Image: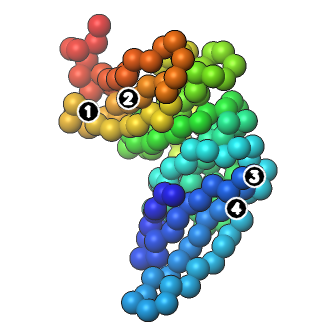
Amino acid sequence: MTMGDDYSRRPFRVRLVTGAVVVILAQVSLGEVPFRRVAVDDSVKNPWAKIIADIDKDGFPDIVIGGRGGPLVWYKYPDWTKAIIADGGYRTVDGEAADGDGSVDIAASEMHQGEDPDEVAVFLNRGQGLKWDKQILSTRGSHCIQAGDIGSDGDMDLMGANWSGPFLPVELWENLSRNPEAKE
């Protein structure tokens, strides 16, 4: 489960249930905690990966879901309007600013058991989620990629590894956009 905050001091959780993405909003109190189940979308094929981030810079968190059968989708808060970021079966997603423009970019990967090519890609957010540019980092797949700022230089770096098969190194994709001298 992933925890977010809808900026009204109400935490919410995203849970993947076979065939549907479910968002649970909860008003937290010291006593009993009431919950409300909201079926956001029941058409996603094998939803798997998820993040909560403010994609469109409106001050509210949105949901991004990747599924084994695709596509990579963004649900805009508060009515959960669906927008397709990319087709394809992305099993892991993470999000941070990759290119320094302050927008949340999406890193996504396909697992190596899928149909080739098994992409590890960054989807650069160009215009508050209205346009996405895809940059492929690898075609050998990765499982459970993680985004973070490895070099403490203010950008999104990625790491991951396949969990089985012939190609098993732990890989780091270091973002060099803020350190041009380091580019090879």
Q: Is residue 35 above or below residue 127?
A: below
In this view of the protein, which residue sits in the foreground, 153 or 44?
Answer: 44
**Label 2 crowding class (10 Å Cα cut-off): few <14, some 14-19, many 20+?**
some
Q: Is residue 119 visible?
A: no
Question: Considering depth in this image, is 59 or 153 the residue closer to the camera?
Answer: 153
Q: For the residue labelled by badge 1, is the local secondary structure a helix, a strand or a loop?
A: loop
What's under tag 3, amino acid-wise?
Answer: Gly
In percent of width and height, residue 18 lies at 72, 52
Residue 115 appears left or right of 104: right
Residue 159 location (% of width, % of height): 38, 29
Number of the label disc, if any, that sits on residue 172: none
Q: Position of residue 163 (x, y in %)?
A: 49, 27
Sequence-wise first label, 1 or 2: 1
**Which label was assigned to residue 40?**
4
- Observer-side mark, 1 or 2, equals 2
From this viewpoint, is residue 28 visible?
Answer: yes
Label 1 sits on residue? 150
Of the two numbered discs 3 and 1 in the rendering, the one whose residue sits closer to the viewer:
3
Rounded to the nearest angstrom, the CA distance separating label 1 from label 4 is 34 Å
Residue kind at label 2, given as amino acid type: Met
Q: Earlier in the sequence, mark 3 or mark 1?
A: 3
Q: Is mark 3 on a helix, strand or loop?
A: loop
Q: How far apart are marks 4 and 2 (CA)?
A: 30 Å
Q: Residue 137: x percent and y percent?
A: 47, 19
